[in-house]
Image (spheres, helix red, strand yellow):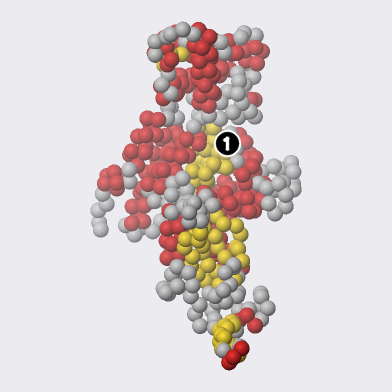
Amino acid sequence: MRITQGTFSYLPDFTDDEIREQIQYCLDNDWPISIEYTDDPHPRNTYWEMWGLPMFDIKDPSAIMMELDACRKAFPNHYIRINGYDRRLGRQTIALQFIVQRPKHEPGFQLERIESHDRTVRYSIRSYAADKPAGERYQ
Amino acid sequence: MTEVDISTAWRESSLQQILDDLDRDLVGLQPVKTRIREIAAMLLVARLREQAGLTTEKPTLHMCFTGRPGTGKTTVATRMAKILQSLGYVRKGHLVVATRDDLVGQYVGHTAPKTKEVLKKAMGGVLFIDEAYYLYRPENERDYGQEAIEMLLQVMENQRDDLVVVLAGYKERMDIFFQANPGFHSRIAHHIHFPDYTLDELLQIGELMVKQQHYTFDDASRRAFREYLQRRIQRPHFSNARSVRNAIDRFKLRQANRLIKQGGSIPVAELARIDASDIYASSVFQDGAAVAVGHTSPSEAQGGEGARR
């Protein structure tokens, strides 16, 4: 099951050139970029691991592509996403965020039904990948 | 396409504009200007050849600027960045100036991220490494400079599209540096030497600076300025245009002091005029001191770039 999230969740995966253009858009808006990765695809997993520090004072996307390539090399089968952070007072939030790499095989989620009080059914989802400990998923 | 319109390509690249600005804004430096003109022409032709489908190796653009302090290396590097940008060899055309302190770390594992940080900032533009020979310290085999050099070389080779590196420093020391690091020498296509300014050129530079700051010399102070420069050149730590700029800053200081002491009401023109006495008050006119150090040859006094006198 293909996980989608972030700004371009409805689009097919970007090519490197398209990623470069999105990065350029962030830089043009003065949004510092950071790279994050994870092997836990749960939608409520908000805080991914940081690949280095957020990158300030960068003028050209090639610098960020260099870091992205390094991250891809270190985690060839993880989820990797790019964040553009808008630091302006009043916004101060992630302005743009998209997935740039995903594992080759995404096993998807199990839907669990939990019997609660008075025959109420509560639902929970659980990634098949998350059965293994962190670091051993998506090998 | 069988014909190529070189004049149009030249005009459209706005190179002429940049080169004219260079000619106008920088006094002297004729050999440098000629070399830059040649490089610009070479790059334009390379671009046209590429468009015409005559495959050429992508030209190596890394450069080395040698010359004494204050001869305009940084200024020319800024212009070079603009030239490269207008030809599309770098995307952004900004200049990042770095020295050893910016590249080399202080403990194990500190150098690589530091160098990488600077390289990332410079991508899409020009990385100007001032006094590059300090990166290499042969007397200390555990020096971290070597690590920075290796990273630089790697990026200079692998990411030639993303960034242009300009090394700068004294000619003699640069030559030694290249002997010790042949990898650098072979990756640098253009070696440009910046000659020292002559007295007349320095005068012209001084006039230009004074004018830009809305001050004026009168005839007496112009003569005094000439005498000042004649003496100043002989002194150690003379760094060409930078020394001229510093001298003018001190003239301004003395002028302001003189006006305040004098008090009363004066014509507006007096606020702009630098008097000969403002110049003659300089320490270079205190004889004895000037003679005592006057014999130090400029090459012996290389150590103190930017030293104030």
User: In this picture, is B234 found above or below A18?
Assistant: above
| Horizontal side, residue A95 vs residue A118: left or right | left
For residue B62, say whether it is visible.
Answer: no
- Vertical placement of residue A17 versus B82, above or below: below
Tell which of B125 and A55 is nearer to you: A55
Q: Position of residue A77 (x, y in %)?
A: 58, 75
Crowd around label 1: few <14 · some 14–19 · many ≥20 (10 Å): many
Which residue shows up at 65% across the image and 16% down it? B293
Residue at position x 66%, y 74% from top? A135
The count of marks equals 1
> Image quadrant of residue A68?
bottom right
Say which of B175 and B84 sits in front.
B84
Quarter of the view holding residue B178: top right
Identify the residue at image location x=41%, y=25%. B212
> Looking at the picture, how far across and down is residue A40, in whole percent?
60, 75
B292 vs A73: above or below:
above
- Whole-percent x and y of residue B205? 45, 23
Q: Mark 1 — residue?
A: B169
Q: Residue at x 43, y 62 (%)?
A: A22
Quadrant the C terminus of chain A occupies: bottom right
Using residue B170 as the reference point, say whether residue B138 is left or right of it: right
Parent chain of label 1? B
Which amino acid type corresponds to the residue marked 1 in the rendered image?
Answer: Gly
Image location of residue B307, percent across then percent down: 61, 26
Residue A84 visible in the snapshot: yes
> SS at mark 1?
strand
The image quadrant of residue B171 is: top right
Most distant residue in the front direction: A118
